[in-house]
Image (tube, helix red, strand yellow):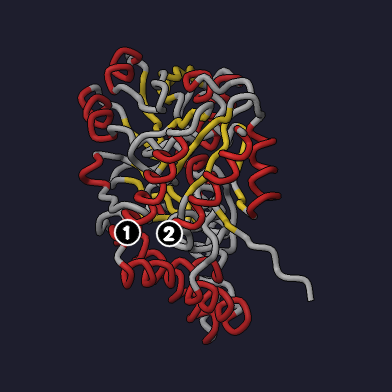
Amino acid sequence: MEATPIRRYLDNAATSWPKPEPVLAAWNHAARIVGAAAGRAAYRSAVEADAIRQRARMAAARLIGGVDPARVALPGGCTLALNLAIHGLVRPGDHVIATAADHNAVLRPLHALARRGIAEITIVPCDGLGRVDPAAVAAAWRPATRLVACTHASNVTGAVQDVAAIAAIAHDRGGLLLVDAAQTLGQMPLDVASLGADLVAAPAHKWLHGTAGVGLLWARAGIEPEPMVQGGTGTRSESLDMPEAFIDRMETGTPDVPALAALVAADAWLRDRGLAATGASCRGLAAECAARLGALAGVRVLGAEGAPIVSFTVEGYDPGEVAVLLEQAAGVEVRSGFHCAACVHEHLGTAAGGTVRASFGPGNDRADIDAIVRVVETIRG
């Protein structure tokens, strides 16, 4: 019998794998046994589905600092959550500030608004490690500025932004701050009060180790984005108007109950392991990998302390070629290219082809680092 090829998965910044067994078990139970829609009926399985959704909301509220669960919506993913916030808040004539370190889930909705003439957008630069200077946000401020959107950590370099300083600038001038926490929630403690954020969006399928199909959108009390999507919510069904409650306005349509059940299980799994310790272990592996790659001739590492992400380039090779060689030679699965981040590579000096990105999760160990370094050494000859 042919041996199963070694699989070294190092693309956790895109989606975490392998999923913890309790997460898969919870997803499977909700899909196979519960089966009903949440918030739509009073029969037993529908009540259980709604209880799963409520537990998921409580878990999400706890994960971002113990906020009011009534202010935590659970839309179908982080991209949808960011779009709900951006399209729901930005009005004609507004000016919005974003950063070059942002993901396209922020930049493309803003670009679409600018192309339609609804709002003006300023994208402030980052440095060669993906870090944004809060002073650049202050310098970009205009009288019409309503919103600042920024990533908590770059999905290309892992660099963590000084969100609290950016929040202070926005609030001093009467603006709002939307934080994309896709690369931080689940691998480092996150407290929206300490960050000073007004809105936070994040997915369940990355560092939280849940599944695709659900994200979260928290908004401070008093911030009420206009619903981007209208439809059924299971509440006020006799009216053609959307309900007024924040979570109803942001959760139009049938929720993904298995994904919500997976989020509940993922939260419990992280609490059992220790979220801070789990994240620190992953970041430790990334730091060791970055140091060892950085010592090789012809290898450039682009990274800073933050999310467990190591982006690098190999002189003389396209990042896509390096990624293929890593998998063929050692079963290492990494991402290559531009990583859905349209603006950051201009500042990193990688606009020609992007980078190779390895991102470490709880399923990785030092053997994975050895494999990466060994292949890159061979490439360099």
State how far apart marks 2 and 1 are (Cα).
9 Å
> What residue sits 33% from the left and 38% below the top?
305
Q: Which residue is mark 2?
A: 208
- Mark 2: amino acid: Leu
**Which residue is farthest bottom?**
44
Tag 1: amino acid: Leu
- Please tell me whether mark 1 sits on a helix, a strand or a loop: helix
Residue name at image x 29 percent, y 43 percent: 222
Q: Which quadrant of the view contains residue 54?
A: bottom left
- Badge 1 crowding class, 10 Å Cα cut-off, few under 14, some 14 to 19, many 20 or more, is many
How many numbered marks have been drawn onto this rendered protein structure?
2
Q: Earlier in the sequence, mark 2 or mark 1?
A: 1
Of residues 167 and 345, which is closer to you in this image? 345
25 above or below 263? below
What x and y, as percent, mark residue 325?
A: 68, 43
Q: Are marks 2 and 1 in contact (CB under 8 Å)?
A: yes
Question: Which residue occupies the extreme front position in the image?
Answer: 381
Q: Is residue 25 visible to the viewer in this orientation of the structure?
A: yes
Residue lying at the far right of the rendered structure: 1
Query: Crowdedness of circle 2 by 10 Å Cα count: few (<14), some, many (20+)?
Result: many
Which quadrant is the C terminus positioned in? top right
Q: Nearer the viewer, mark 2 or mark 1?
A: 2
Left or right: residue 122 compared with residue 30:
left
Q: Nearer the viewer, residue 273 or 4?
A: 4
Which element is circle 2 on? loop
| Residue carrying label 1 | 63
Say which quadrant the N terminus sits in. bottom right
Where residue 100 appears, as percent x and y from the top left, is 46, 24
Q: What residue do we see at 34% from left, 60% from top?
A: 278
Instruction: Answer with left or right where residue 160 lies relative to residue 34.
Output: left
Q: Residue 118 at x, y = what percent?
A: 53, 21
Residue 255, located in which quarter of the rendered image? Answer: bottom right
